[in-house]
Image (cartoon, helix red, strand yellow):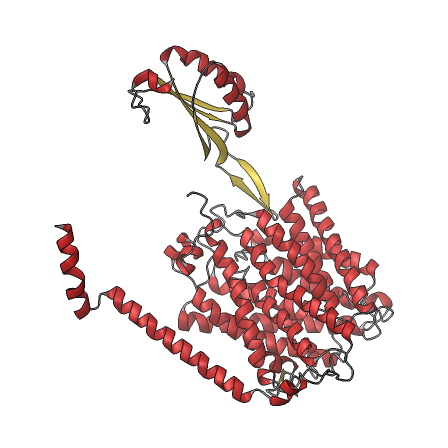
Amino acid sequence: MKKIEAIIKPYKIEEIKNSLVEIGVVGMTVTYVEGFGSQGGHKEIYRTSEIAVSFIPKIKIEVVIDDDKLDETIDAIIKHAKTGTIGDGKIFVYNIENAIRIRTMEEGSIAIQ
Amino acid sequence: MAESLEKTEPSVVLQKIDTPEEKRRKNRIKKVAIFTLTLLITLAAGVFLANKPSLVQNENSVISGLDNTDIVFMIVSAILVMLMTPALALFYGGMVRKKNVLGTIMQSFTALGVVSIIWFVYGYSLVFGPDVGHLIGNFDFLMLKSVSLAPSDIAPTIPHQLFAAFQMMFACLTPALITGAFAERFKFKSFIIFLILWTTFIYCPLAHWVWGNGGWIKNMGGLDFAGGLVIHIASGAAALACCLVLGSRKGYQKENMPPHNLTLTFIGLMFLWVGWFGFNAGSALCAGTLATTAFINTQIGATAGLLAWIGVEYLHRGKATVLGGMSGTLAGLVGITPACGFVNSTSAIAIGLIAGMVCYILTTFKGKFKYDDSLDVIGIHGTGGIVGSILTGVFASVLVNPAGADGLAYGAVHLFNVQVISTLASIFFAFFGTLILLLIIKKLFGIRVSEFEEMQGLDISQHGENAYRLQI
């Protein structure tokens, strides 16, 4: 099993969710986060003073999937998250040791299907 | 094991020796008892002092000279002005950081409480009581004694008490305006002391000079229709003194301190704007043509200020912002305040535009000065008030208000000179007076929260509350 953690532009979330559901991903966790990468923030104006805001709102998606779905999932996220402009985000891939469904105590890939 | 501990520990040990917490609790109870006792004594004194005649007059249904239309108008105006202080709490509250929103609201909120009582006990008497040396009123109206339901000279068609109530709302608003200058760092206990001293030693004398019978600015012919000098210039000059004595917020100009909720600020501004109609039109003291002039000029001044600010901002920064629009509206309202009952509507546009632009320029240069006027009290109330007061000396016309005078634009120099002198006198008095009061408070009680408390935010450190708990 793998975990994919993707940091994306907030307004892309619906599009990405739909595409992942289409390829058979059955669950995800979404967190509203703030941060910066090479983009380095933007400027805001408050009553004649311009301030540099370094932490920009983003959404972090976490999905856990079977190994064989990895490439398909990553492709789907990239396809919908990409705008070609700076600040499109990052994807991180982790190995997952185990997964347990709390209700039934099923373990392994059954727990994420 | 656990059960036996619970049984043996508390009853035996705690009864003999008080823990520090227990001591603090008992101390607190003692303080509350003393406070309650003082309150009761004051109340008893009040009942003793209260004049019987004014109570009797309640039963007289007809008092000659009263006009019911004017009474309705003035009660509604007073309600509108009362709304401005809580509106200011929201306006300022949205502009500070999340951790200080309640602390900021609390400052305006308590101003309403403290100043209302002061006004009743001796404030009204000091401002509108019989004159002493052209500087201050005497104590004839203590506890609103002999302020009856019959009309007075100053407002001949409404009960004297209603006039006192209307003026009470102005007195509450003024110190609340200053709180924007020292947002996010004033110690609450010292703030209450500041409120009492400032209202007593700065607001009361200044208001007497301008509005009281026999006050020297009034005698000289200085015009201030609804409080440009007394309210906006005074709070602006006091704000400068506050910035100098308190110093900047921790991290000022190093960290970002953006407003935490501009929609809250917008709600506050809209209530302020609505309240301002009571403030300006109500200052005519009767329903009629003068109130109508003031009403129209208020709207025109405010909107001219709004357009001036976002126009200049758009040219300067390439974007028109909501906070900018709100600041411009406020600048326009402040600017038109002293003039609204003396100028025609064309002049009101000019005053609003000039106030909006001048305030924009001044707040732009704020960063160059070292002081931290957190929410721009100097930049908007001080500057707008000065612009409005001086321009009253330019645009005032006897055609609009026979009780006024002609300004520079109508070929008379006298009024302009008088306006400049009274403006400078108000700035000078409010600035140095406030400076002295603050230095005394600083010496006796301390004025700033500790560095840790400032980091924590006023909400938790001063009031033990949290404004937003968005999770379960």
Q: Position of residue B244 (x, y in %)?
A: 51, 63
Q: Is residue B389 left or right of residue A7?
A: right
Whether residue B330 is situated above or below residue B156 in the rendered picture: above
Residue B241 seen anywhere in this rendered image of the structure: yes
- State the image quarter where residue B226 is shown: bottom right
State the residue at coordinates (58%, 47%): B262
Residue pushed farthest top? A68
Q: Is residue B185 left or right of residue B163?
A: left
Q: Position of residue B456 (x, y in %)?
A: 40, 53
Q: Position of residue B178 (x, y in %)?
A: 56, 64
Closest to the observer, B278 or A100: A100
Numbered label tally: 0
Whether residue A86 is situated above or below residue B38 in the rendered picture: above
Closest to the observer, A99 or B82: A99
State the residue at coordinates (38%, 78%): B34
Residue B425 seen anywhere in this rendered image of the structure: no
Q: Position of residue B42 (x, y in %)?
A: 48, 82
Q: Quadrant of the C terminus of chain B?
A: top left
Whether residue B15 is situated above or below residue B362 in the rendered picture: below
Closest to the observer, B335 or B465: B465
State the residue at coordinates (48%, 65%): B245
Q: Is residue B125 left or right of residue B348?
A: left
